[in-house]
């Protein structure tokens, strides 16, 4: 039987129409009202507040729950592996968070994330005065990264400006202590190293939290107004180096030859010394032996010495005039011809044995002795 047919007692299947409300499904408005009352009770509103609101009241508790959930979700943040997060609680430094998922109460904590591994480049240029009162245009590049997040965020108001000013100060100090030639060519590497060291000292003193990786002196040249004159100076220095290299090459070529000649002269002198000394020693030995012979036969020895002396003298003369005693003519001896004939005979008589020569020598000595004895006897007779 339908609920609205006659005799059906006007029963509403959904619990309405004044029938028994427990017989049908609950009213949706009633469920919402009960839920609101429970929420009001949880948040201190009490049952009376829900009753006074009626079925048309605004669900403030639900709004509060949603806001609380949103507040909690907004507090989560992610810190990457290459980052660090500086946390300020009510404007005061609280902590530095590393990589991972973190939560901080919004509106209470302020989180500032910085990249700790990114290498950044700062470039500075300018005209500077060198040690020798010259002006040079310098271009410098500084590669750096953040080393301390707290100092970088909190200690300095503008870290980049501080870095630029510290770079200019350090570079001017180093260039002012170096000559123009050193900045441009000879000591560029040393200038970069000294600038990096001094710049890091300034940054550590200012507590910037910046670590300098590399300082490169990319360009250094004279001002445009004096570039031509400076080019002339550079060419002159290059010519100086070239001439020095040529002179060194010539010295390397000449000095060994001179040393070799000097060594040869020294060795010749040593040989001459040894020859003279040995010759003197030989003469001394010969004189000692001749002295012994002289003591045995003084007359013969004197005669032999005289003949040897005459032979030496005559061997150096090409013509000899002999005054014959008792005669009116002088005898002419062509010694040059005789020497040639003697040389020919010597060549022809190479096969004469030493024994024959000794025999002839003994005969000549005996004849000389005889002639000397006859001469002495004739003198005694007169």
Image (cartoon, grey):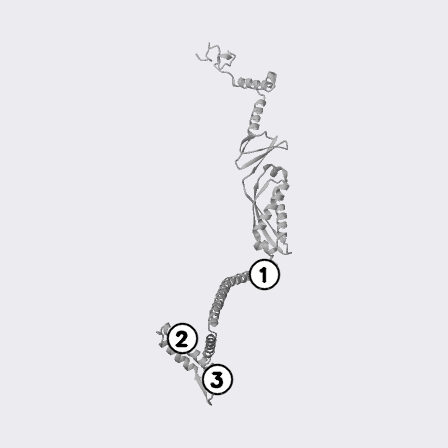
Per the image, label 2 sits on a secondary structure element best described as: helix
Of label 3 and label 2, which has the lower sequence position?
2
Q: Residue at x 39, y 79 (%)?
A: 342
Per the image, label 3 sits on a secondary structure element best described as: helix
Which numbered disc, 2 or 1, marks the residue closer to the eye? 2
Q: Mark 2 sits on what residue?
A: 362
Q: Mark 1 sits on what residue?
A: 233
- The residue furthest left is 351
Q: Is residue 293 above or below residue 142?
A: below
Residue 194 makes an appearance in the image: yes
Of label 1 and label 3, which has the lower sequence position?
1
Q: Mark 3 sits on what residue?
A: 381
Q: Quadrant of the N terminus?
A: top left
Q: Which mark is residue 161?
A: none
Which residue occupies the foreground of this view, 9 or 347? 347
Which numbered disc, 1 or 3, marks the residue closer to the eye? 3
Q: Are marks 3 and 2 in contact (CB under 8 Å)?
A: no
Q: CA distance from mark 2 to mark 1?
A: 92 Å
């Amino acid at each position: 039987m339908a609920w609205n047919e006659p005799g059906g007692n006007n029963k509403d299947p959904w619990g309405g129409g004044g029938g028994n409300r427990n017989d049908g499904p609950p009213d949706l408005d009633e469920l919402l009202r009960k839920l609101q009352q429970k929420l009001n009770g949880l948040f201190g509103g009490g049952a009376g507040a829900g009753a006074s609101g009626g079925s048309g009241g605004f669900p403030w508790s639900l709004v509060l729950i949603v806001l609380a959930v949103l507040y909690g979700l907004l507090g989560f943040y992610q810190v990457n592996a290459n980052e660090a997060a500086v946390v300020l609680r009510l404007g005061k430094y609280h902590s530095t968070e590393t990589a991972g998922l973190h939560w901080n109460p919004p509106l209470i904590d302020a989180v500032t994330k910085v990249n700790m591994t990114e290498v950044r480049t700062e470039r500075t240029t300018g005209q500077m005065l060198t040690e020798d009162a010259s002006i040079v245009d310098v271009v410098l590049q500084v590669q750096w990264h953040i080393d301390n997040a707290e100092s970088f965020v909190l200690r300095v108001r503008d870290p980049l400006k501080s870095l630029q000013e510290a770079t200019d100060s350090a570079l001017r100090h180093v260039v002012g202590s170096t000559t123009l030639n050193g900045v441009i060519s000879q000591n560029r590497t040393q200038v970069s190293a000294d600038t990096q060291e001094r710049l890091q000292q300034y940054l550590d003193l200012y507590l910037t939290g910046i670590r300098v990786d590399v300082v490169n002196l990319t360009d250094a040249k004279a001002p445009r107004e004096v570039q031509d004159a400076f080019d002339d100076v550079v060419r002159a220095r290059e010519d100086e180096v070239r001439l020095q290299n040529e002179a060194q090459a010539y010295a390397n070529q000449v000095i060994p030859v001179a040393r070799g000649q000097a060594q040869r002269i020294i060795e010749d002198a040593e040989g001459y010394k040894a020859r003279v000394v040995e010759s003197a020693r030989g003469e001394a030995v010969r004189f000692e032996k001749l002295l012994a012979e002289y003591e045995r036969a003084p007359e013969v020895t004197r005669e032999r010495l005289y003949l040897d002396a005459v032979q030496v003298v005559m061997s150096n003369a090409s013509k000899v005039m002999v005054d014959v005693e008792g005669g009116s003519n002088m005898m002419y001896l062509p010694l040059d011809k005789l020497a040639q004939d003697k040389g020919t005979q010597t060549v022809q008589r190479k096969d004469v044995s030493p024994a024959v020569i000794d025999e002839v020598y003994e005969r000549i000595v005996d004849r000389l002795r005889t002639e000397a004895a006859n001469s002495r006897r004739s003198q005694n007779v007169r």
